[in-house]
Image (cartoon, rainbow, N blue to C red):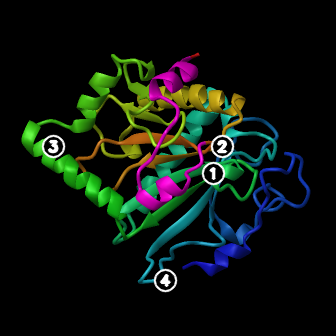
């Protein structure tokens, strides 16, 4: 339980983009004692391009042995009125390099096994503030769903002597669920996806977390994110995206998962755990390819 998080400032999805009150993520509203690191400017007349803050309402803490970890906020731009989907190529690449830097630094903390970088965009996706930001959740615990996934992954690798995700990439890039691809990355809508327009982006190279992406892979991932998030922005979709990585598992295959939240789970899904998706992933891929 984290009752203190209920006190965090919130803006609902019905508010216009124009500020109604002081924004805690704008340069003038940031509390200086929460700043962890700032990154150099990309444009003139900026104090910084990206700032990393301690989360004022953390889920985990390095002082809590039962919920051990660190929770950070990445302020993606000093401009209150810009969305991530509006970023240029260099800005998106810069953000991905910050993701690399935070993963690298947090992985050095003793007992940290899991570094989750995620973004909530829009009220339906759980965003509490409009100012463009993402978060980092670094923890000792490994979520049960990931433990189960890695169990199946290791069993598959043992039986087939290959990575299940590498095989998935080769299959999906030839099919109707493929959105875009190049020599470094492949993006597709997964079979039996949980959400309308759900998208996975994989590096072709088998690597275990974002830190290992090289410059060309960063550029390619930035290009794909701009294309897909730009399309979702124009469709007015709320979404979550996250980096699928575990720092303590070196034989995983890193990827980015984007999950729009327009499809609402009802009693069937919540009660049974069975997900009914009314939009075929092939049709979703066709819409995102345009």
To which residue does mark 4 refer? 63
Q: Nearer the viewer, residue 58 or 267?
A: 267
On screen, residue 206 versus residue 266, left or right, reads left
Q: Distance between the residues labelled 4 and 1?
A: 29 Å
On screen, residue 200 versus residue 239, left or right, reads left
Seen at 76% across and 39% down, the residue is 82
For the residues labelled 2 and 4, say whether their Cβ atoms are less than 8 Å apart: no
To which residue does mark 2 refer? 238
Q: Residue 125 carries which label?
A: 1
Q: In which quarter of the image is the C terminus?
A: top right
Q: Distance between the residues labelled 4 and 3?
A: 38 Å
Q: Position of residue 231 (x, y in %)?
A: 64, 27
First in sequence, mark 3 or 2: give its number: 3
To which residue does mark 3 refer? 156
Q: Which of 136 and 146 is in front in this view?
A: 146
The stretch of residues the image draws in magenta is 263-289
């Amino acid at each position: 339980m984290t009752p203190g998080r209920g006190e965090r400032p919130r803006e609902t999805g019905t508010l216009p983009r124009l500020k109604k009150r002081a924004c805690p993520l704008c340069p003038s509203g940031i509390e200086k004692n929460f700043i962890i690191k700032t990154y150099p400017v990309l444009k003139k007349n900026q104090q910084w391009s990206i700032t990393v803050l301690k989360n004022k309402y953390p889920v985990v803490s390095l002082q809590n042995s039962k919920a051990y970890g660190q929770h950070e906020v990445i302020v993606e731009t000093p401009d209150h009125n810009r969305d991530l989907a509006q970023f240029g190529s260099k800005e998106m690449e810069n953000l991905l390099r910050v993701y690399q830097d935070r993963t690298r630094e947090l992985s050095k903390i003793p007992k940290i096994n899991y570094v989750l970088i995620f973004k909530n965009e829009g009220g339906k996706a759980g965003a509490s503030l409009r100012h463009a930001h993402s978060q980092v959740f670094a923890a000792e615990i490994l979520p049960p769903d990931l433990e189960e996934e890695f169990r199946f992954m290791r069993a598959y690798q043992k039986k087939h002597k290959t990575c299940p995700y590498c095989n998935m990439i080769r299959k999906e890039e030839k099919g109707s669920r493929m959105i875009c691809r190049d020599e470094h990355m492949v993006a597709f809508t997964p079979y039996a996806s949980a959400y309308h327009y759900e998208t996975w982006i994989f590096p072709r190279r088998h690597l275990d977390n974002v830190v290992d992406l090289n410059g060309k892979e960063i550029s390619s991932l930035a290009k794909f994110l701009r294309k897909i998030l730009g399309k979702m922005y124009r469709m007015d979709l709320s979404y979550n995206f996250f980096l699928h990585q575990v720092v303590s598992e070196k034989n995983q295959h890193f990827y980015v998962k984007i999950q729009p939240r327009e499809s609402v789970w009802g009693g069937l899904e919540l009660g049974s755990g069975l997900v009914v998706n009314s939009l075929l992933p092939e049709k979703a891929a066709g819409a995102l390819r345009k």
